[in-house]
Image (cartoon, rainbow, N blue to C red):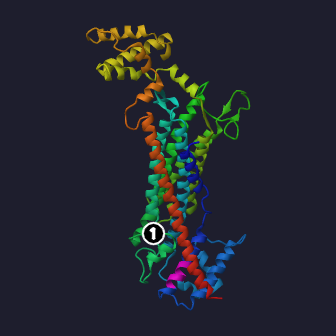
Amino acid sequence: MTAAIIAGAMATEALAQPAPRRDEFYWIGQTNKASVVINSEEGLLDPALAPRIARGLQTVIDAGGRPGGRRPNLVITFEPLLIEAAGVEATLIHAGRSSQDMLTTVRAAMLREELLRVAGALHRATQTMIDNAERHRDTIVPNYTNGVAAQPNSYGHYLLGHVAGLERDMQRLRQAYARLDLSPMGTTVLNGTSWPLNRDRMGAYLGFPATIENAYDAAQILAAEIPVELGAVSTSIAIHVGAYIADVMTQYAQPRPWLLLAEGDGNTYVSSAMPQKRNPGLLNDVRRQASMVVTLATGRTIAAHNIPPGMNDPKSVADNVALTAGTTRLLEQWDRVMRALVLSRERALEELDLDWTASQEIADVLMREHRLPFRVGHHVASVIVDVAKSRDYRPSDFPYAEAQRIYGEVLHEMGLPEGELPMTEQAFRAALDPAAIIRARATPGGPQPAEMTRMLAGARARLAEHQAWATGQRARIDAAIARLDADFAQVLARAN
């Protein structure tokens, strides 16, 4: 294992254990704590009343933390418990607040943490794929287009192509997170309040770096579009997972696949009737989960469609968390697939020699090194493939003399001056060698060794930056909560 892989594993471990889920009850409690602290310090709440209200609030929170304790998830069902514990004066902290801005804040805080869970799972899956890409940077396999073997490639290069897609998924996630990570508190219902609330301080206590600018936007527009954007992020991830799984699944239709799941450990299962079968259960599970994520994501769009601003249809915490939790599970399952795959280098090379995926290189060499028009060289290669398939020749045993004959016939057919095949037999064989083709690639972003080294380093650096971002977001939220709890504890201490 290389030092880069070890370092990546350590970074992945840092994101492996997300914080316990904080539910609506928790965040309603935190908004109430913030209101007690801020309003008592800024003249909106009599400081003499604050300790008694704080003690009642803490009583409700403590009771909700006990087994079977009541944990209401709405402001209007939380408040009666607070009144019971602290008296009706406790509702003085409701100055300038509404259940709309409070619940919008609660939902944003919860979805913000859900997105960080998705980010952690996305980081781990990407890390595994990069590690596999490095491990297989020199493993030559067939690649396919339109469901047909097309060209040889390194499996590592193929995987880095998928990594690029996952990097865009992380970018989309971070962009969605930035729009979600804004505090709606203090916007009340539609147009704010006559109370001079300190919205910036309230947002900071709840871990938000800034507030939503327009009070109408907060609960009426943005709150309805965020679930749709989360659906788009999840859909993109599911499409990438599904494409990869479909590619692996094609191997299971072959009698001798070059890529398989390791048997056992829940990866595969046997048939009840056919002894030879090893069904790829894990692949089926991941594909099914990807379809479920797309279903849930589409539902977020349908729920938000064709309704007046402010309606609750798309705002359901349960529905939105089902989407993010389903996406997290999908990524965790995909990561398991990538760890369970077994690739046979020898069988992959054999597969390449069964087909003519390297034939384009003949046309490229004839044009690049001998200035033959590409379409002429392409026709030479095409006729070689036709003859080979009709006579069951493989690239490794195709007669050089036959290639010379075909070259002459194509020149005559296309009205060009007669000439001999300008490629020596050694050059002809090299043009059909998949490994040589990979090494000779000159395109930036190709599978040649130097480019693989560059791209692997870049992928690891970008992944590390994403990991640092996610870790930083968690740290900022936790630090804000710690500050709020400490300041609230000071108010609470005066009640004793």
Q: In the figure, 87 relative to 431: above or below?
A: below
- Residue 256 x/y as whole percent: 61, 25
Residue 313 seen in the current view: no
Q: Residue at x 43, y 10 (%)?
A: 400
Q: Quadrant of residue 410?
A: top left
Residue nearest the observer in this picture, 19 or 444: 444
From the image, tell me which residue sits under label 1.
209
Quadrant position of residue 452: top left
Give the x, y percent position of residue 392.
Answer: 51, 12
Region in magenta: 33-39
Q: Number of callouts in the render?
A: 1
- Residue 37 belongs to magenta span: yes
x 63%, y 84%: residue: 55
Whether residue 120 is situated above or below residue 52 in the rendered picture: above
Identity of the amino acid at label 1?
Answer: Pro
Secondary element at image label 1: loop
Of residues 13 and 416, the one nearer the viewer is 13
Image point 58% across, 56% down: which residue?
14
Which corner quadrant holds the N terminus?
A: top right
Q: Main secondary structure of the magenta part?
A: helix
- Front residue of 149/363: it is 363
Query: From what the image shows, is residue 272 above or below residue 299?
Result: above
- Residue furthest out toward the front: 3
